[in-house]
Amino acid sequence: MQNREECNCEDDAFTNEDSEEEAFSDESSISDTESVWELLPDVCLRHVFRFLPDGARSKASLVCHQWHDVMRSPCLWRTRFFHFSGRLSKYKPSDYCSAVGYVSSLGVYLEKLEVCVCPPRTSATALRLKEAICGLLNELVRVKAPLQSFSLFKLEMDRSSWASVHRNSVVDSLVYLLESGATKLTTVCLNGLKNDLQQGLKLLSALLQYQKNLSLHCYILSLDLRGFFSATAPVHLNPNMPQILEQLQGLTYLGLSYSCLSDELLIALQQRKGGGRWNSGRDGSILQTFSLHCRRNELHQQLVHGSSWASLASRCPELNVKLTVEQVINTEWLRRILLPGIPLREYNMTAFYSPDDNCSAKPLLCDLLPLYRHSLQYLTLDLSNCRESLDDELLDLVQVCERLVDLRIWAFLEIFTVGRLLHFRMTKTMQLNKIKLRIYSINDNLEEQEDQLEEVLSPYLELFPPELEFFAKVCPYI
């Protein structure tokens, strides 16, 4: 008994020693975890803090002196996005207070600013938006924010909710920013402002004067003016637009609505300083990307000659044109737009046919897009072709376009067309490595088509090369 009790005591002692060691190891692991954060260098903390929203950043800055100091690092505050709705809420501060407060305290670090606006439906909302935008722009001037990139989206000042005095205030504040506050801008995006002709030209003149005031070899490199003018403004008839663009040096990216396009504008881009390899802008750059957006409700039937496009392409040999077409489905209208001389690299089209439209997408697929077989690389088509079959035409187009790398189709297609397309990709030398297909269906029960698609894809799934990104799905047509 004594031996057994002694053994039990020894066992208990051994167990107690083990438990003490485990407790010690737990404490050391906790302290090690804490020390990991203490030992992280500032550069790692800044990388982590970059992913935090503003509220979490404020709380993190209260943890310790090191985190507080790191949170004041300029790199964490160089980029900012604001969304202005113009609506009032008792749960959060107004657009004006949040934007101006941010710029007042941290605007000295701000290098990239994006402001997206929810277009106003009432005059009261438009007034609040005007106050928020003008207050923000004036504060940027006051703190001398070192902006390099500035974007203002979707203001839509052609709405009836905008009073003329409020439109003028917004334009004047933008002009004031260009004249007094901005010194380092290289990227400007005024997409969707929808100014009238007079206000738009006033802003562009201020932009031109801003560039003239910059130091030598400092230029605006990227300018996005898609939707900059209202849909009814006859911009292509006004000579001031080409004259202003001709004097903007160093542009490598230009975005315009098709309503601005004319032979005179294309000629101006040719004659622009920096418009040829032998007389280039900063870093030897020339116009490289020309993005055009064509909408049905905007002017798009003006006559532009293919020779003007060909001349621009010869003067800017690195030029790539991106064309987005929305609801322009008339074949004759498309023939005016899709001219042979365009160095078209990307084509995006959305076309929803109504029962009254006597239109077909076959001329586009068979005659117009094959003109760009040597340049077209990105093709996106969203077609409501429920009244006509386009399977063969799409497959022929894919085979003809020898440089195509990205294909995205939303259309009514036969399920077996997916298999035929994959067969082309697997058996022929093609650069097409991104394929996304959404097959429209008007059937309430999609299971049969989904099973058929799975059956068609099954022989190819294990044969996909690693560089191929493929996606196909049956979707209800709404």
Image: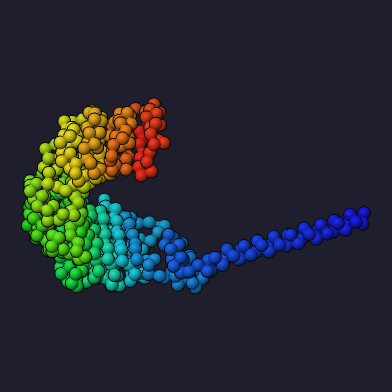
Residue 72 in the image: above or below residue 382: below
Residue 165 in view, yes or no:
no
Q: Residue furthest top?
A: 448
- Give the vertical position of 265 relative to 377 (above or below): below
Name the image quarter holding the C terminus.
top left
Q: Residue at x 57, y 63 (%)?
A: 33
Colour option used: rainbow
Q: Position of residue 164 (x, y in %)?
A: 17, 58
What residue sits 40% from the left and 59% below the top? 92
Residue 432 in view: yes
Vertical placement of residue 441 versus 179, above or below? above
Q: Camera-side residue: 166 or 112?
A: 112
How many marks can you see?
Answer: 0
Q: Nearer the viewer, residue 144 or 155?
A: 144
Pick the quarter of the image with the N terminus: bottom right
State the image coordinates of residue 366 (x, y, percent, origin top left).
17, 34
337 and 463: which is toward the camera: 463
Tell me which corner region of the image, top left, top right, bottom left or bottom right, holds residue 13. bottom right
Q: Residue at left 22%, top 53%?
A: 192
Percent position of residue 356, x then y? 18, 31
Q: Quadrant of residue 462?
A: top left
User: What percent of the width, then of the height, locates residue 122?
Assistant: 26, 52
Left or right of 70? Residue 132 is left
